[in-house]
Amino acid sequence: MLANIKEFIDEWGIDVWQSVIETFQMVGISLTISISIGLPLGVLLVLTRPTKALENKYIYQILNTIINIIRSVPFIILLFFILPFTKLIVGTSIGVQGVIVPLVVYTAPYIARLMESALLEVNKGVIEAYEAMGIKTRHIVWSVLVREARPSIVLGLTIATIGLIGATAMAGLVGAGGLGDLAYRYGHLRYEVDVMYVTVFILIVLVQGLQSLGNALAARLKKD
Amino acid sequence: MITFENISKVYGTKKQPITALDDVSLTVKKGTIFGVIGYSGAGKSTLVRIANLLERPSDGKVFIDDVDLTTLSKTKLRQKRNNIGMIFQSFNLLQTGTVYENIALPLKLTGIPKKEIKERVKKYINVVGLEDKLHAYPSQLSGGQKQRVAIARALAHEPSVLLCDEATSALDPDTTDSILNLLEQINNDFGITILLITHEMHVVQKICHEVAVMEQGKVIEQGSILNIFTEPKTETTKRFVHSLFNEQVPESILKDLKLDGKVITMSYVGDASGDPALALVSKKFDVYPSILSGRITQLKGEPYGRLVVHLKGSDEEVELSINYLKEKGILVKGYNNEVDINAS
């Protein structure tokens, strides 16, 4: 048994490690960019809603439609569909660099939706209390809305991250590597089942770990 | 001082307008506690929310300390709101913040220096008596304690006016009393003008100097607390007063009693006491008074008593004794209809 493991590590260790790093890179970078786009977008969605502080039918409807359109397209199609756009932005459409753009385009609207629902959960009375105290809207957004929604935001981001890990599996199609790619190329195409099992195992551990971390963090932020 | 001038508020569409407030004018004098009472849907909640323009009136003006809020720019209104405290039925505290943070954060966001924030939190947490809960989260507090935190949060801005939107409606009777005592103390110590709305007569009776009764978007009766209690004019007001003095006498008993004599309601304020007067009546006239129900209560500090009494005797003797009671400064009315006994 131990010998088997040693043999596997000798043969595949470097490849697996490499794939883990690639997956982490893709998820890390595209998650960071997606949050910095998705969170403000989510806030905007909430604020421009009818009867909210910055009520604006047009902005709300346009945002809503764009997000719905992007979210209707499966990632594997989106990946190829926006190739020209990707090339325009980062100069290449292959490798880790080339996959970041479609991953962000895929994830940011999803995060915007998750943020929207997290922010809508915040007790309206608290926001009203702060309005009544004469607090500026931008302060209310940051110090009340986002602050109070933190537990739900963390849970939302956990979901988004896990979705993102799934999406990176398809990144191999444009030569970006990652765990999914490894499992597909070696495990499926070349019938190295061990590689597939190990990759799937790593993915399971990764997702489980992330969800537990997210849950624990949300519980700590929740205070009730 | 708070002044509402011809305030109207209409919701809904042009085709189906819903009038929440219909030409309401009220003045809350500086340093007083003013209660607005009404059943749900009477428009009182809309009224208090118009006092700081959380809702804009369709028509009319709102003055706080002689400044017309409806004419202020967004920025000016925001600054003015720093000076208007408000507390709510659901407390509206940050769930994710400690008691300290709940009081300090709004101060910080309005640009008050750090050192002063610390001093103010310390001062007002003492006022509401929660010094030992400074680092607790709202979920660890009882309803009454949460409302105390909300009060401290409002006071920390050192407002001239405090608006209370059903502030005690979610609390049990004992806690309600302790919060009312606190509000009264704040009114006394800091001279803050308080406008409170409620559907409980008990709240009004305990701390308000003046009362307005609202129904269907209108103020139907207004006056000093004594006035409203002793001389309620409208049906709604009478019902509110009755709600406090649960003096229902069963109809069947009443019917029997009315056969020989009269059932009256006596009310008296301050030193005039009903009991000795009744004793005297039975000595002076040929009547036998028996008390069916009675209660004495405090109306903003003054004792106020009400008795439902059956006077057994001939019509003539009963009439004489009623006149005698009136001479003694006691308000005598027929049971349950509140009309002056002589008119009936």
Image: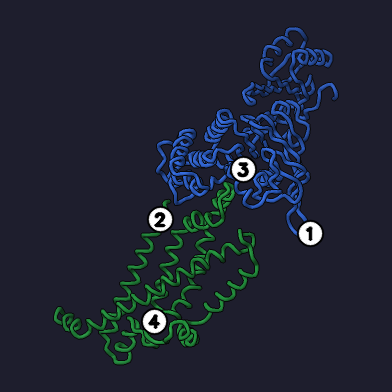
Chain colours: A green, B blue
Instruction: Please give the name of the residue rendered at 40% of the width and 59% of the height, measured from the top-left corner.
Output: A218
Instruction: Please give the name of the residue rendered at 56% of the width and 78% of the height, measured from the top-left corner.
Output: A69
Q: Earlier in the sequence, mark 4 or mark 2?
A: 4
Tag 2 subunit: A
Query: Which of pointers 4 and 1 indicates the residue nearer the eye?
Result: 4
Q: Which residue is mark 1?
A: B14
Using the numbered discs, state the Cα–Cα distance from disc 3 to disc 1 in whole angstroms: 29 Å
Amino acid type at mark 1: Lys
Q: Which residue is mark 3?
A: B165
Query: Which of pointers 4 and 2 indicates the residue nearer the eye?
Result: 4
Q: Secondary structure at mark 2?
A: helix
Amino acid type at mark 2: Leu
Q: Which residue is mark 4?
A: A97
- Residue A94's spot in the image, x, y percent? 39, 87
- Residue A146's spot in the image, x, y percent? 48, 58
Tag 3 subunit: B
Using the numbered discs, state the Cα–Cα distance from disc 4 to disc 2 in whole angstroms: 34 Å
Q: Are marks 4 and 1 in contact (CB under 8 Å)?
A: no
Locate residue B261: give its quadrant: top right
Instruction: Please give the name of the residue rendered at 53% of the width and 68% of the height, measured from the top-left corner.
Output: A41
Within-10-Å neighbours for mark 3: few <14, some 14–19, many 20+: many
